């Protein structure tokens, strides 16, 4: 006859490892009138009914018991057995490890998870660890004392093995940590390798065609996939994303498309219920470049969140800005803190920025131009980040194209794509409403208002009412501005035949209201060119220390003009840029006449 096997239950084992019919070694825990309680380990207790007790016992005596049955409420019925010969065998927790993506099926059970610590948040109650494994993101709560950091030896980025019970709280899965251990050397390397390999695969964007036919977009596909891949990777590893964008209709469309894709991907991939708020931040920038003020603010918040909430340092995505020399001072700041930066832009790029970037999408790199707007690029990249948002965002490129006055063939294709729902006039209205509302939002993103303006808020009636009202207000403000300024416009014809119009937006326009100087000059320019069909026209709107340029039919290169002015006019303090034929230039107030005179001379020499 074979020896009987007596099992010894390990400390981390729970009910899952106890089997009916098997025999276990336990100890006597206490006595009741109807029998004795027996512990199988420190967590699991059963009852031997007095009719099944074979011997006399005192407390803490070892005892061998057979499991008669496990009731549905978890109570265990035991009987005492007294084998004379037996072997003991250890039972360890059945933890080949569970994937975070599977814990929904394990509610109420103990699981073992191996993964990387992506965030450590101390609440007034437990410490919440966000953990990332090869399948998903999850939260684990560990408690020693209210508000006291549990497992202080565990740090951001550590690879850990944790066990705990899966709980459901407020519709969210959470693991209540029973034990957590930082893995070292080979163990850590093995887990990290597994996570990295899976991550590369999970971060890979889908292979889908663009919404419209476009040679330029096709040529940009590798760079667009690279940006989408990095965004997906950031989301899947709980790295926060800061999206900086130009505060105009095109920049907003680009950024909101990405916002939709990223927030939905965050929701899909688990983690905290409010993760979409602290893992994604959208911030409009007034200037068409990443200003020192912006990077300083971003860095300030990122470092505080890192110190206070144990967040990873963010990835920065610049849209409708970020491609030029003017961005370099801010990019140098990001490099000191090792922040990954990516740019999606259609301003004429300078090669100098590329050494600071891990991704750069710009139509000029592949022979395209500003006609491929940031909103087009942003929407197509958003689809690569998360294709499920396509239906919500497919009208954004048309709005961006109209808002940014694209003349590329893609403009009409994107308009045609949504023509049954949005006419070109609708798109123009929405673009104007965005510009107008952003003016009053200033540095705020207005996440929910902007969704209503773009008809992503799920209430088309409100969308229509809101856009109508904003357009009416914007047009009234523009009319007031035009009434004030039009009588003060000076004009002349330059040697190359260019009609030059000049307006002093400081003296003859309402200040600190909508439309701001750039838009005022643009509006004036649009009205004046209507009366000069086919003629080359340049409009300059200037203040004490700046000039904005709008042009038609003149082959200018504003970034180059700025470079020349900077060297030619000593003490002019010239800076600026923008697109080739639309832009703005800053200078010191005392040198305005010299700068304007020299600028006008250059415009007068430009080919028509
Ligand atoms: Mn733009």
Image (tube, rainbow, N blue to C red):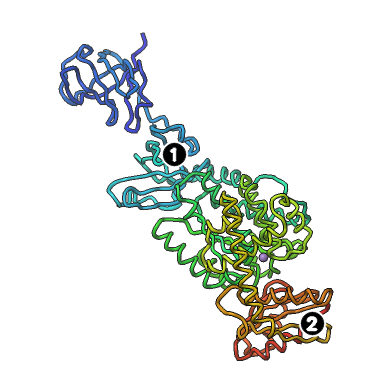
Q: Where in the figure is residue 445, as x and y percent of width and height?
A: 53, 62
Q: Determine the residue positioned at 63% across, 63% down.
A: 249
Report the side of 102 relative to 573 (left or right). Answer: left
For ligand 1, which image quadrant applies? bottom right
Quarter occupied by the C terminus: bottom right
Q: Determine the residue positioned at 77% across, 57% down.
A: 412
Give the camera-side residue of 94 and 378: 378
Q: Determine the residue positioned at 78% across, 87% down.
A: 492
Q: Where in the figure is residue 537, as x and y percent of width and height?
A: 78, 78
Report the side of 44 relative to 398 (left or right). Answer: left
Real-space CA distance between mark 1 and mark 2, rounded to the nearest whole angstrom: 71 Å
Tell me the element at label 2: strand
Disc on res. 244: none
Q: Name the residue under label 1.
A: 113
Q: Upstream in the sequence, badge 1 or badge 2? A: 1
Residue 522 falls in which quadrant of the image? Answer: bottom right
Residue 60 falls in which quadrant of the image? Answer: top left
Quarter occupied by the N terminus: top left
Q: Name the residue under label 2.
A: 499
Q: Where in the figure is residue 345, as x and y percent of width and height?
A: 66, 63
């Amino acid at each position: 006859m074979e020896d009987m096997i007596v099992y010894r239950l390990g400390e981390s084992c729970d009910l899952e490892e106890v089997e009916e019919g098997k025999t276990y070694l336990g100890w006597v825990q206490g006595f009741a009138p109807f029998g004795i309680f027996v512990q199988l380990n420190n967590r699991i207790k059963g009852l031997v009914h007095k009719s099944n007790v074979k011997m006399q016992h005192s407390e803490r005596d070892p005892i061998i018991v057979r499991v008669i049955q496990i009731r549905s409420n978890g109570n265990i019925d035991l009987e005492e057995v007294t084998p004379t010969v037996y072997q003991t065998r250890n039972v360890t927790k059945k933890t080949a490890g569970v994937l975070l993506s599977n814990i929904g099926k394990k509610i109420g059970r103990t699981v073992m998870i191996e993964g990387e610590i992506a965030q450590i948040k101390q609440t007034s109650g437990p410490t919440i660890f966000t953990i990332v494994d090869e399948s998903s993101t999850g939260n684990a709560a560990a408690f020693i004392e209210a508000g006291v950091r549990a497992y202080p030896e565990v740090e951001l980025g550590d690879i850990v093995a944790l066990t705990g019970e899966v709980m459901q709280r407020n519709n969210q899965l959470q693991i209540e940590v029973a034990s957590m251990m930082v893995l070292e050397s080979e163990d850590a390397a093995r887990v990290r390798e597994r996570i990295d390999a899976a991550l590369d695969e999970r971060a890979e964007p889908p292979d889908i065609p663009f919404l419209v036919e476009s040679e330029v977009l096709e040529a940009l596909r590798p760079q667009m996939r690279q940006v989408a891949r990095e965004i997906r990777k950031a989301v899947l590893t709980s790295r926060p994303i800061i999206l900086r964008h130009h505060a105009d209709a095109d920049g907003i469309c680009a950024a909101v498309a990405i916002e939709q894709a990223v927030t939905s991907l965050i929701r899909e991939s688990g983690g905290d219920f409010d993760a979409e708020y602290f893992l994604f931040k959208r911030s409009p920038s007034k200037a068409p470049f990443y200003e020192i003020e912006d990077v300083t603010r971003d860095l300030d918040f990122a470092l505080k969140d890192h110190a206070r909430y144990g967040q990873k340092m963010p990835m920065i995505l610049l849209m409708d800005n970020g491609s030029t020399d003017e961005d370099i001072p801010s990019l140098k700041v990001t490099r000191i803190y090792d922040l990954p930066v990516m740019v999606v832009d259609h301003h004429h790029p300078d090669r100098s920025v590329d050494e600071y970037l891990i991704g750069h999408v710009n139509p000029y790199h592949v022979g395209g131009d500003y006609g491929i707007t940031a909103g087009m690029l942003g929407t197509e990249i958003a689809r690569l980040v998360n294709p499920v948002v396509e239906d919500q965002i497919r009208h954004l490129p048309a709005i961006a194209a109209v808002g940014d006055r694209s003349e590329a063939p893609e403009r009409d294709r994107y308009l045609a794509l949504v023509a049954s729902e949005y006419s070109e006039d609708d798109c123009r209205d929405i673009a104007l409403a965005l510009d107008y509302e952003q003016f009053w939002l200033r540095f705020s993103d207005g996440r929910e208002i902007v969704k209503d303006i773009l008809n992503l808020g799920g209430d088309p009636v409100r969308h229509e009412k809101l856009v109508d009202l904003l357009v009416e207000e914007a047009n009234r403000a523009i009319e007031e501005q035009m009434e004030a300024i039009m009588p003060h416009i000076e004009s002349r014809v330059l040697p190359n035949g260019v009609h030059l119009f000049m307006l002093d937006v400081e003296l003859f326009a309402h200040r600190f209201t909508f439309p701001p100087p750039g838009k005022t000059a643009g509006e004036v320019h649009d009205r004046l060119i209507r009366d000069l069909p086919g003629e080359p026209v340049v409009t300059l709107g200037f203040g004490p220390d700046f000039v904005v340029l709008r042009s038609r039919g003149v082959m200018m290169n504003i970034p180059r003009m700025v470079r020349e002015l900077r060297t030619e006019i000593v003490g002019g303090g010239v800076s600026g840029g923008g697109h080739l034929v639309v832009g703005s230039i800053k200078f010191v107030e005392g040198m305005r006449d010299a700068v304007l005179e020299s600028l006008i001379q250059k415009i007068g020499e430009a080919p028509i």
